[in-house]
Structures are given as C-alpha cells and as structure tokens.
Image (cartoon, rainbow, N blue to C red):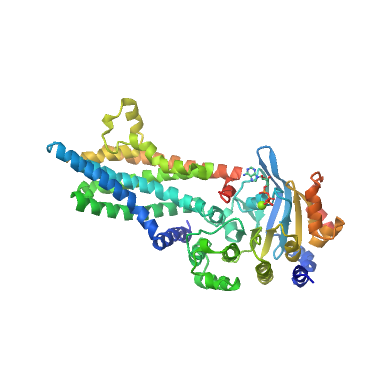
Amino acid sequence: MSVSSIIVSCAPRTLQKLPNITVMNDPVLEVRSLTKRFGSFIAVDSLNFELYPGEILGLLGVNGAGKTTAMSMVLGLITPDSGSIRAFGMDMPARRTQILRRINFCSAYTALPSNLLVWQNLDVFAGLYGVRNKKQRISELLEMFEITSLKNMLTGHLSSGETARVNFCKALLNQPDVLLMDEPTASLDPDIADKVRRIIRQVQQERGMAVLYTSHNMRDVEAVCDRVIFMHKGRILYQGTPTEVAERNSERSLEQLFIRVARSGDVECIPSVTDKDKKETS
Amino acid sequence: MNYEAVLALVRRYVFLYTRSKIRLVELIFWPIVDLMVWGYLTVYLQQQGTGGLPRFITFLIGAMILWDVLFRAQQGVALSFLEDVWTRNVINVFVAPVRTVEYVVATYLVGCLRIALTFSVLSLLALTMYEFSIFSLGIALAPFFANLLLFGWALGMISTALIVRWGPAAESLAWAVPFIIQPFAAVFYPVDVLPPLLQVLARWLPCTHIFEGMRSVLAGHPMPLDNLLWAIGLNASWLAIAGWTFVHMLKVARLRGFLNKFVVA
Ligand SMILES: Nc1ncnc2c1ncn2[C@@H]1O[C@H](COP(=O)(O)OP(=O)(O)OP(=O)(O)O)[C@@H](O)[C@H]1O
Ligand SMILES: [Mg+2]
C-alpha cells in the first residue's frame, strides 16, 4: 500500500456529514456571479460558490484557470468587475477589515520578511490581527508545526519547507473562521505535507474552521477536501466530492480527470451550478 | 483607528533596525558624508572670502540638515512600503485587517524614528565640527522642522503611490522624487537666483518658504510669519493631493490585480 493511499484511507472524512452542515448553517462565504476581466481576457467568469463552516473546499484547475484571481478577490486584493462576495453575512469590500479579522491566508508564493527572526515576524502579525496572549499563541503554533527550535532563526535562512510551516503559523495566529490557502503544500516533503494536512483537519474539526484550498497535487486534494470545484477558463466545470467528480466523469481519480481536461483545451464550460442544482445533486 | 495594528507595523522596523546594525549605519552614513562635504566647502569659501561671507557656513549647513529632515521623511514613508515589496510581504500585509490610514500612520511614525536619529547625530556633529548649532534658529526651528516633515511625508506618499501603480520598476523614481524638486526648492540658494519662471514653480513648494525663512532667521531677522503661513497652507494642499493619489493608485492596483504581482517581484 502506497503512502498516499494510506493518507487517503486514514484521513478523517466528514463527507457524510456535509449535507447536514449545509442544511444547519449559513455559509461563511458566499460568492455570486463573480467576474474579473484583465483587459479583454476573462480570468474569472460568473463564478458562484459557497463555503460552509467546517468544510474544506478545493479549487482545482489547470494553470491560469482563475483560482488565485478568485481567491484574491475574496481577500480584497483584487476588485471584481461584477458579482458579490459575502463573508459571515458581511459584504466585501465594504466591511473589509471586519471580514479580514476572521480570515487568514497562506501560500507557498508569499513570504514573511526574510530579515526578521521567526518569532519577530509572528509577533508583528499577531499584533496586526489583534491576537490576545501573543506569546502563548505563538509558542503553541510553533510546537504544533514542530518548529519551536526555529524560533530564533532568521526567516530568510529557513528552507522552503520550514518557511511554509512558519507561514502556516502566521495563517492560524488569529484562529481564523475561514482559511484560504493557495498551493500551501507546494514546497513540503511528503512527511511534512502529511502532518500539515492532519493539523488543518484537526483545527477544522475542533473549531469548525472552513478552508478554501488550491493545490495541483490531486492526491492531496482527495485526501483533504470535502468538496471540490473544478475551474476551467474562469468558470466552474465540475463540482462535488472528489470521488463524485471523478466517477461522474468516468475517471478513476481526480488526477486522470485533470489530465484529460488539461489536454482537451476545447472542453465546453458548463454554466456554474446554482444552489438549486446543487441541492438536487446532494 | 486600531493602534495595536499601527504599533505592530512600527515594531517591525524597531526589530529590523535593532537587529541589523548595518541598517543603523545606513541611516547616518550619507548624512555625515553630506555634512562633511558642505561643511568643509563653506569653511574653504569663508577662508577665501576674507570674512565677507560669514553667514555661508550657517546657511549651507543649516540648509543641509533641514534638507535631510525632508529627505528622511520622504524616505521613511517610501521605504516602509518598499521593504514589504523587497521581502515579498505585501500580500500578507494587505490581507491583514489593516486600514490604509493605519498603514500610512505607521509609515509616518517610522519616518519620525528615522529622522530623530539622523537629526540628533547631525546636529551634534555640526556643533563639534563647525561650531554651528542648528538650535541657533531658536524657536523658529520647531515650525520649520514640522513643515519639512509634513512635506516629506506628502512626497513619500506620492512615491509609494508610484510604486503601488507601476510596481518595483518605479523604485528608482521613489528615490529620485526629492531630488527632482531640490533644484526648485531654494535649499542652498535664495529663490531670487532662479529664472522668473522657475521662481513661480518654486513658490508652489512648501519647502521653498521654509528654506527662505531659515535664511532670514539665520541672518538675524525675526521669524517670517508669511513664509510660515505659506508653507502651512501649501502643505495642507500637498498632503491632500498625496493622500488622494495614494488611495487612488491603490484602487487602480486592486482593479488591475497589481497587488498580487508583488509576489513575483
Ligand atoms: N494582474 C493581471 N493582469 C493580467 N492578467 C492577469 C493578472 N492576474 C492574472 N491574470 C491572468 O488571469 C488568468 C488566471 O490567473 P490565476 O493566477 O488566477 O490562475 P491560477 O488558476 O491561479 O493558475 P496557477 O495554477 O498557475 O496558479 C491567467 O491567465 C493570468 O495570466
Ligand atoms: Mg494560482
């Protein structure tokens, strides 16, 4: 049995619980008809989705599908051309700071200032997020990601995997209700990637944190995501649980489906699935 | 305003400057070099001028120190943002619950800290090397200083706006902004020296009125109120324009997706 299949079979699944969650709770994030053009190019095209408390939602798609752009709009880094984003019942960007207090973000492609020590960086961001008991929270997180020994290291001297773990600490500082992760595990070795997935799962289960997750590692996605949205050319091509999406398209795995979509550039995008359609499918 | 966020942003620079000694050196190295060049030049001119140019030394060194206040204020603001660009940290800061005004106030405070250090070192050195005390400006020093700070901040915000809009490519522009205005700002010479057209331009800069005022005070005249009022009025307009430019460029950057671009810069 391969390591990845162990991960897949061991990963705690909340898929079965998902319909209950959707019925009982309001979404923490609601995206409606979100559209972004760069010049004449449409990067995100009438995107609709919602994220429920305690849910891990994967955004998949080939390079340039619009995943990062969509995430950046949720974070207020990019202003949409049209459509709406509501988080915790509040409008983005009208209530930007209130929303951002309850969200956090990490990516393999951003870094904390390389010229500060690890603890100094975490201390600064703890201040930015208004974290109480900063010291204790920072120690807890460092311990959780097994990097207590790196506390006094210069951030720029860390390996990329260590940097990624410090980024995770920063992302969990404010105990976010929604965590957005853009290819967070890209630089992690399989062992650490597995640990990180477990931690994310654990926090998600203990605190009902919702996660929006992009990754090009389909096994990662299958192991961690309750539901996936497969984007193509800015639109939703498929959505459902990872197994559903693969099976519905007669593929053995998401990876097979991904490769098929990537190689057939002319796939007709289906219109975004509406709430009504989704209830029917679930 | 969330003071905790402002303090966190300021703390970052305190960490940086206390950890990295070379950064501290950078803060005083060029000002000291400037002070020596201008100082000894004026000493030489005084020796040649058979005592006919006694005020030169005070004019030039005074101008040099006050110019540095303006320059440091501008740099304090522009560098705070550049530091985020250089360290790929822009996104982390912009997805944190920090309001634009908090970010700007923090960069101002960082500017103040930088200036406090350079100004103390320069005043002390000027006193020991050339027996020039910047405090001979008396009570006028405070409003002069304050107005140069304000104008420096306005220029800093404009520089940052350029970087937000045009990315790290505009970095060198950010360094150049103070020097673009220096020839018109009558820093080292009276505004009358300029051709009439440039004089008009010069009078739109708040710092011109400050440097004119400084020369007047050093020449033994009372503090020129009209200069001061002009400087205050112009500063208010410049700050308003700079603030608007910064907010507008941020808006443009968000519309065109430039803030993400800093990731790969
Ligand atoms: N600021 C911008 N200006 C112009 N085009 C942009 C900008 N940002 C993104 N794009 C374009 O929009 C499309 C979607 O980009 P995006 O970064 O969202 O893709 P992605 O799905 O995250 O891809 P990847 O998997 O490679 O990270 C790409 O074709 C990209 O070139
Ligand atoms: Mg991306």
Question: Which residue is outermost to the left?
Answer: B50
Disc tally is 0
Q: Position of residue B203 (x, y in %)?
A: 33, 33
Foreground residue among A87 and A210: A210
Q: Position of residue A114 (x, y in %)?
A: 50, 59
Above or below, comparing residue A107 to residue A191 in the picture: above
Which image quadrant for residue A167? bottom right
Q: Is residue B50 visible?
A: yes
Q: Can residue B143 be seen in this view?
A: no
Question: Which residue is outermost to the top?
Answer: B196
Report the side of B9 relative to B32 (left or right). Answer: right
Residue positioned 80% across, 68% down in the render: A16
Foreground residue among B193 and A104: B193
Q: Where is residue B59 in the image (x, y as percent from the top left)?
A: 22, 41
Report the side of A241 relative to B134 (left or right). Answer: right
Q: Where is residue A232 in the image (x, y as percent from the top left)?
A: 75, 48
Foreground residue among A215 and A93: A215
Report the side of B119 relative to A164 (left or right). Answer: left
Above or below, comparing residue B191 to residue A77 in the picture: above
Above or below, comparing residue A70 to residue A157 in the picture: above
Which image quadrant for residue A101? bottom right
